[in-house]
Image: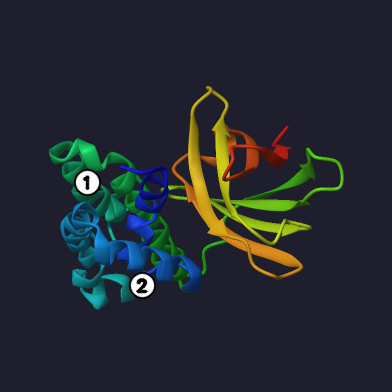
């Protein structure tokens, strides 16, 4: 496998859920046409995305339910976990898929709770400062969700070429990938990502280049 293949393979989960921008969708589509291994993984992961479409609409439309949001999301996440155990070689791709499923389910649940008159989810603003002189800077809004935390990035002065990753560091030393995206010609880049970490357990956010260099970072405390 080439390094380019390994990088593109991380786009498998968002591809299945339709979460890629036009540039990444074109890159991964071209790769998929020539890679039997990735096509096999897409075929295996597609049924997981279908779980959301099979949930009856009246489940989400009901004004009040006996179950909690966490219990409603649990069957979807359980299905993803079962697939990960059955095919460990797809752990990275299905991990990204699990985060995307959680994000989509959280949006649906959040909309239903808002309709019921519940207060908005707590949020925390984190300032992102450049680590390379006059490099990129901005902010990240952390919004608590039943499944973890939604992270909304706003960055200025980001280089207009290359690929970037949001790395979320936990207070216990663990880290997760919150989002990946390709550069555009926009003056301000806005990206929405997600992590399974509760907002209170997030210590640091990093914006990292494809070469592994930290371009900006912010701390919650």
Count all numbered tags in the image, as a single digit.
Answer: 2
154 is higher (above) or lower (below) than 82 = below
Residue 53, by quadrant, is bottom left
Image quadrant in which the C terminus is located:
top right
Name the quadrant of the N terminus. Answer: top left
The answer to whether mark 2 and mark 1 are in CB contact below 8 A is no
Quick check: 28 left or right of 189? left
Q: Residue furthest left?
A: 86
Local secondary structure at mark 2:
loop
* Mark 1 lies on residue: 78
Whether residue 61 sits left or right of residue 113 in the image: it is left
State the residue in front, 132 or 118. Answer: 132
Which x, y percent locates residue 169?
Answer: 57, 33
Q: Which residue is mark 2?
A: 63
Residue plotted at (28% across, 56% down): 72
- For this view, does 187 lie left or right of residue 36? right
Residue at position x 37%, y 63% in the image: 28
Callout 2: 10 Å neighbours few (<14), some, many (20+)?
A: few
Instruction: Compare residues 212 and 200 and report the one nearer the observer.
Output: 212
* Res 120 seen here: no
Looking at the picture, does residue 120 appear above or below residue 202? Answer: below
Residue 152 in sight here: yes
Q: Nearer the viewer, mark 2 or mark 1?
A: 1
Q: Position of residue 175 (x, y in %)?
A: 50, 32
- The quadrant in which residue 171 appears is top right
> Residue 164 location in percent, x, y?
59, 51
Q: Quadrant of residue 84?
A: top left
């Amino acid at each position: 496998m080439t390094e380019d293949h390994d990088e593109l393979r991380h786009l498998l989960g968002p591809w299945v859920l339709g979460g890629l921008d036009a540039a990444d969708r074109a890159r991964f589509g071209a790769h998929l046409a020539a890679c039997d291994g990735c096509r096999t993984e897409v075929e295996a992961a597609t049924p997981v995305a279908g779980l959301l479409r099979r949930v009856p609409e009246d489940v989400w439309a009901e004004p009040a339910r006996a179950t909690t949001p966490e219990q409603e999301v649990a069957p979807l996440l359980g299905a993803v976990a079962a697939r990960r155990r059955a095919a460990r070689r797809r752990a990275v791709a299905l991990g990204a898929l699990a985060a995307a499923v959680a994000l989509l389910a959280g949006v649906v649940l959040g909309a239903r709770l808002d309709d019921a008159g519940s207060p908005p989810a707590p949020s925390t603003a984190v300032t992102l400062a450049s680590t390379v002189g006059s490099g990129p800077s901005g902010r990240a809004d952390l919004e608590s969700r039943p499944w973890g935390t939604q992270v909304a990035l706003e960055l200025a002065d980001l280089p207009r070429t290359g690929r970037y990753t949001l790395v979320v560091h936990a207070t216990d030393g663990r880290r997760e990938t919150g989002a990946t995206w390709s550069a555009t010609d926009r003056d301000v880049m806005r990206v929405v990502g997600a992590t399974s970490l509760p907002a209170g357990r997030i210590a640091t956010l990093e914006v990292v280049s494809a070469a592994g260099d930290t371009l900006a970072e912010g701390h919650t405390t």
